Image: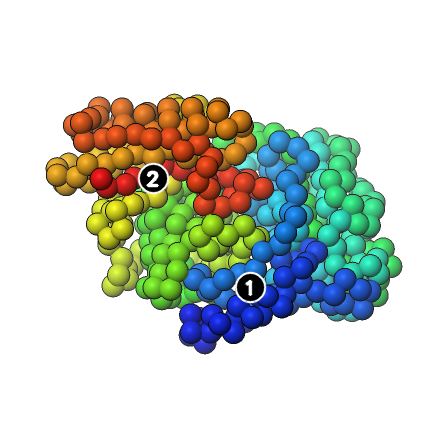
Amino acid sequence: MFSTQTFSLRHSATFALLVVALLFVSCTRNSTSNSSNSAPSNNPTAAASPGSTPSETPGDAKPSTDELSLVSLSAGAIIVKKPSEYNETWSSIWLIDEKPGSGWATPEGVTTEQSIVIALPELTQLKKVVFDTASNDGDDGRGARDIVVEMSNTGANDGYQKIAEVSLQDKADNQTFPVAADVPGRWVRLTIKNNHGSPKYIELCDFRATGTQLTHTALPNISGTYTTNFNDLHLKQEGTSVTGCYETNQGVLVGGTNGRALNFTWKQSNGKGTATMVFTPDGKQMIGVWWNEGETSSGSLWNGTKKTDAVGSCANWSGGAQEQITKDLEESGRARVYGINFDSDSDKIKSESNPTLDKIAGMLKAKPDWQMTIEGHTDSTATAAHNQDLSERRAAAVKTYLQTAGVDPSRLKTIGYGATKPVASNDTELGRAQNRRVELTKQ
């Protein structure tokens, strides 16, 4: 892995040449010769920092169902026991990103039984499991074949009961199986027994599962300092709003929680983009996926372990949601706000969003000469007309809240953009969650 110090913006020209050379791929997000002798490609973007330019994979398909995967990053799931892995680009985390164009592979020569444990954010009862193998790299039978799926409500290491035992086709997506037993649990274990004959690797591109979440609890407060692959990360949570900074290239972030996931915008001295983070149930570990602004690739990893509940600080961080949103508006005239959450397909603001809206109201009262436009943005799930209407109504709902909080409505304008201005791919729930947002612009 490149260190942040050695992989900087001054290497961008060399890196761009690498990206061009690595573009046509299968299960990776980069290219490789699609022959029986090819190894899983080693993508240099996996070691880059936010601000570099990862490659993209064309043709990543949407999942076959509109049902949300309850074992995905977007649902707040996190892998707590990893199998043997070829490298970070072929990490098991890509099994739960809902993109069949990324995936997991063993190191070369490792084709023995592998186990993966996924911690779910809620007590869950699964009804259906889905696997993708169409984009496996190579044609030598390296795709996962026989898999046992188990659930536990005891812990990550024991108490498992089998809910499905499946045999996968090689090179086929959307392989769907009903579960054989109704077993509520918080941990899912996949045991991949073998492949289709390759002596080199086992590969699997995506795992999804649908069913029912039996509990619904809020994300525990995640404020604190985390040791991460981009140096220390400082997070401060205020209701659904989360702001912070990280000690790489003057990095700052502003975002908010939605369910069990944190969506945010990061900015640093050499770029900006979006990211999603999820946390283990005890809040001690996090895993994030970050993208450059507008990027549609699978993203790159941002991992960390909590080292203290003390938030700490950075010299370039304003220190809270109200302060950071104010700074963004002063510097660029625009602030993207996550943490204003609505009921599904509705303009009804969830009460959990009130602290975030109160921070915005406080900012406007502290800046009485500011005129503000409130923008509503949606994902692309529904029709263009429906999304346009919904985005307009959501922007209007935010204005109504701010007016009720004491902001003069003559200072506020609203506009809806529907799904016309995405900041991430709409092909996965991770990207769609980034696109559902409110933005503020200073007139």
Q: Residue at x 63, y 61 (%)?
A: 23
Q: Residue at x 60, y 37 (%)?
A: 70
Find disc 1 in the rendering and name its residue.
Answer: 46
Q: Is residue 98 visible?
A: yes
The 10 Å Cα crowd at callout 1, few under 14, some 14 to 19, many 20 or more, is many
Q: Within the image, what quadrant is residue 184 found in?
A: top right
Q: Give x and y (percent) for residue 185.
A: 62, 37
Among all residues in the image, which is located at the extreme bottom? 6
The answer to which image quadrant residue 369 occupies is top left
Q: Which residue is mark 2?
A: 439
Q: Secondary structure at mark 1?
A: helix
Q: How dense is the environment of label 2, judged by Cα within 10 Å: few (below 14), some, or many (20 and up)?
A: some
- The amino acid type, in three-letter code, at marker 2 is Glu
Instruction: Residue at 35% x, 61% y: name it.
Output: 268
Rendering coords of residue 17 (x, y %): 56, 70
Sequence order check, earlier mark of 2 and 1: 1
The answer to whether any part of residue 154 appears in the image is: no
Examine the rendered structure and indicate whether residue 217 appears above or below residue 114.
Answer: above
Q: Position of residue 190 (x, y in %)?
A: 71, 48
Q: In the rendered view, does 47 fall on the left or right side of 393? A: right
Q: Quadrant of the N terminus?
A: bottom right
